[in-house]
Image (cartoon, helix red, strand yellow):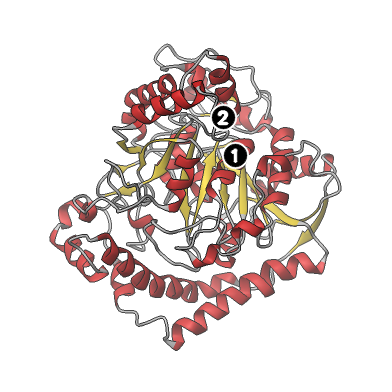
C-alpha cells in the first residue's frame, strides 16, 4: 500500500487525533516519516531476516549485539504492549556461542543468530517457565525436554529470547474470554491502538512481531489462533497443514486441529521460519509423512510472478457487508492484474449450524489431551479437574474477568470412544474436507482459494487441518486487514508462492506506533 492509498487517507482523516497519526504511521513500501527519538534502535523497525543476516555477514552486527538491541526494545516498548511474558536469561550466552560458530565459518541456516519469541504454551527445557498463561503452572517442574518446535529452531541457530503472552490456555477456558488476557501476563495490547482487541490466542506473538520487538515469533492455532492475531496486528501468519509441524511439547487443546505456525512481517521470513519448524517427529504420529511432504527450503517457491496462470477460487460469501466488499475490491483487482484467474466460489455447507459439533470435538479432545500433558509434566495439578479447583480457589487472580465454562463442559465429557464424539468428528471433518475445501477446489479445477481474512474462512481451513496464510493489507478504521490464501493438505508451496506475489504487488504492511486509542471521527 502506498502512502497515498485512499483507504489509508480516509483513516488518517479521522478527527484531530488523525493529524498526529499521520506523522506516526508508515508502511513497508517506504516514504515514511522519521522515527521518534524515543524509538530504541529504529534500524530494527521492519527489518527482515535477510537484512539482519547481511549485516552479520559483513561484520557490522553480531548475534549478541542483535539480542541486546531487541531486549532493549522490549524493555522500553513492551510496558505498553505487554506482549512478552518472560526473557530468556541465557539469550546472550546462546548468542555468544552462535557468534563463535560464525567466526569458524559455521552457519546453521538463515536463522543463525536471529532472535525469535515463542508462545508460552511451548515447552523449553531451560530457565524459562511454560504456563499457557496460567498461574497454576507457574511453579510446575521445568519440562524435561524442549518441544520439538523449540528444538528445531535452536538447531537452525535461532536465539529464543523469551516467551509471549497469550489468551490463557490458548483461549479455551471460557466462552466469554478476552483475547490476549491471561492470569499470569494480564492484558496484551494491540500495537496500533492500545485500547483495541489484539485477537488471540497467540496475541503476544502477533503483537511482538508487529511492534518490532522481534523479527519473528511462533504461535499456535486450533481455530484462528495464528491467523486472527496475525491479521489483526498487520503481519503474516501461517497455519500449516496438520502434521507438518510437530505438537510434541506444546500444551494442547485438540490433536485433530492443533498446530504451531510462524508469525512474521513478511512472507519471506515466514517461509524461512516454516523451513526450520517443519519435520517428522516420532513423538507426534501426525507428522509421520512430514519429511516426505516438505521441501528443505520453502523460500525457493517465492516468485514475484507467482500468481501468473494461477486458478484461484474467490471466497466472498463470508464478507457480506457492501462497504467491506468495496474495501477489498482493489486488492482483488491486484490478484487479476498479477495474472491470476479468479472464479467465484461458494461453500454449500452451513458451518454455523455445526458449531455445537465443532465445540464438542474440542472439548472431548481437550480433556484427554491436557490430562496426558499434565501427567507427563509432573505438575502439582495433574488433571483438568485439578485446574478447575485451582481456578475456583484463586478466583480473584484467575477469574476476575471471565469464568471457566469450557473447562467445566470439557470435564463432563467422556472418552474418545464415545459415539457422540466420533459422530461429531466425522461430521465436521467431512464437511470441511471432502464436502468443503476439496469439493470446491475440484469443481472448478482450482489451485487454491483466496478471500478476505475472516473468521469463517480461517475456521474452515482450521477444522479441516488444511493450511492457510494471511497477508497484511493495511488499516481499515480501527483494525488491520488481510487477504487469506488457503487450500488442500500439504499445499504450502503453492500458497507461499501466491501470497508472496500478492505481497509484492500490494506492500500493505503498516508499522504501528502505539497510539493510545483509535482517533474518533469529529
Residue closest to the eye, 176 or 247: 247
Residue 458 is left or right of residue 446, and the answer is left
Mark 1 / mark 2, whichever is N-terminal: 2
Mark 1 closeness class: few <14, some 14–19, many ≥20 residues within 10 Å: many
What percent of the width, then of the height, locates residue 194? 39, 34
Disc marking residue 457: none
State the count of labels.
2
Q: Dot 1 corresponds to which residue?
A: 272
Q: Dot 2 corresponds to which residue?
A: 49
What percent of the width, then of the height, locates residue 432? 62, 70
What percent of the width, then of the height, locates residue 240? 58, 54
Is residue 292 depicted above or below 212 in this figure? below
Q: Quadrant of residue 171?
A: bottom left
Mark 2 closeness class: few <14, some 14–19, many ≥20 residues within 10 Å: many
What percent of the width, then of the height, locates residue 36? 45, 14
Residue closest to the eye, 521 or 409: 409
Q: Residue at the location (61% across, 63% down)? A: 289
Amino acid at each position: 500500500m502506498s502512502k497515498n492509498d485512499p483507504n489509508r487517507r480516509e483513516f488518517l482523516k479521522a478527527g484531530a487525533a488523525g493529524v498526529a497519526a499521520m506523522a506516526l504511521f508508515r508502511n513497508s513500501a517506504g516514504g515514511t516519516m522519521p522515527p521518534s527519538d524515543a524509538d530504541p534502535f529504529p534500524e530494527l523497525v521492519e527489518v527482515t531476516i535477510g537484512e539482519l543476516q547481511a549485516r552479520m555477514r559483513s561484520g557490522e552486527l553480531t548475534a549478541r549485539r542483535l539480542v541486546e538491541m531487541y531486549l532493549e526494545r522490549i524493555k522500553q516498548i513492551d510496558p505498553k504492549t505487554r506482549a512478552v511474558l518472560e526473557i530468556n536469561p541465557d539469550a546472550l550466552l546462546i548468542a555468544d556461542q552462535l557468534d563463535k560458530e560464525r567466526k569458524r565459518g559455521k552457519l546453521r541456516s538463515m536463522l543463525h543468530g536471529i532472535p525469535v519469541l515463542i508462545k508460552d504454551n511451548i515447552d523449553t527445557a531451560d530457565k524459562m517457565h511454560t504456563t499457557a498463561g496460567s498461574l497454576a503452572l507457574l511453579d510446575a517442574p521445568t519440562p524435561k525436554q524442549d518441544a520439538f518446535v523449540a528444538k528445531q529452531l535452536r538447531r537452525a541457530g535461532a536465539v529464543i529470547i523469551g516467551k509471549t503472552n497469550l489468551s490463557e490456555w490458548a483461549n479455551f477456558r471460557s466462552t466469554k474470554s478476552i483475547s490476549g488476557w491471561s492470569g499470569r501476563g494480564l492484558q496484551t495490547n494491540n500495537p496500533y491502538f492500545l485500547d483495541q482487541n489484539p485477537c488471540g490466542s497467540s496475541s503476544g506473538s502477533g503483537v511482538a512481531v508487529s511492534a518490532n520487538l522481534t523479527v519473528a515469533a511462533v504461535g499456535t492455532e486450533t481455530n484462528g489462533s495464528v491467523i486472527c492475531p496475525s491479521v489483526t496486528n498487520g503481519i503474516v501468519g501461517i497455519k500449516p497443514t496438520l502434521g507438518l509441524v510437530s505438537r510434541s511439547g506444546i500444551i494442547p487443546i485438540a490433536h485433530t486441529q492443533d498446530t504451531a505456525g510462524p508469525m512474521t512481517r513478511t512472507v519471506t521470513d515466514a517461509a524461512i521460519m516454516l523451513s526450520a519448524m517443519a519435520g517428522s517427529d516420532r513423538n507426534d504420529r501426525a507428522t509421520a509423512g512430514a519429511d516426505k511432504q516438505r521441501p528443505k527450503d520453502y523460500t525457493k517457491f517465492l516468485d514475484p510472478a507467482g500468481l501468473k496462470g494461477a486458478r484461484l477460487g474467490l471466497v466472498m460469501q463470508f464478507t457480506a457487508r457492501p462497504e467491506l466488499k468495496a474495501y477489498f475490491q482493489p486488492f482483488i483487482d491486484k490478484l487479476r492484474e498479477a495474472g491470476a484467474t479468479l472464479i467465484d466460489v461458494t461453500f454449500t455447507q452451513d458451518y454455523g449450524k455445526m458449531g455445537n459439533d465443532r465445540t464438542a470435538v474440542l472439548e472431548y479432545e481437550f480433556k484427554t489431551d491436557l490430562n496426558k500433558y499434565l501427567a507427563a509434566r509432573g505438575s502439582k495439578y495433574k488433571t483438568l479437574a485439578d485446574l478447575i479447583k485451582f481456578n475456583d480457589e484463586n478466583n480473584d487472580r484467575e477469574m476476575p474477568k471471565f469464568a471457566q465454562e469450557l473447562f467445566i463442559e470439557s470435564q463432563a465429557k467422556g472418552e474418545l470412544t464415545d459415539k457422540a464424539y466420533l459422530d461429531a468428528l466425522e461430521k465436521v471433518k467431512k464437511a470441511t474436507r471432502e464436502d468443503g475445501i476439496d469439493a470446491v477446489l475440484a469443481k472448478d479445477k482450482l489451485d487454491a482459494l483466496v478471500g478476505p481474512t475472516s473468521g469463517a474462512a480461517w475456521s474452515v481451513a482450521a477444522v479441516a487441518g488444511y493450511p492457510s496464510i494471511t497477508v497484511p493489507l493495511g488499516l481499515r478504521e480501527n483494525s488491520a486487514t488481510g487477504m487469506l490464501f488457503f487450500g488442500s493438505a500439504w499445499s504450502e508451496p503453492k500458497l507461499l508462492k501466491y501470497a508472496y506475489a500478492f505481497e509484492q504487488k500490494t506492500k500493505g504492511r503498516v508499522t504501528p506506533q502505539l497510539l493510545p486509542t483509535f482517533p474518533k471521527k469529529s
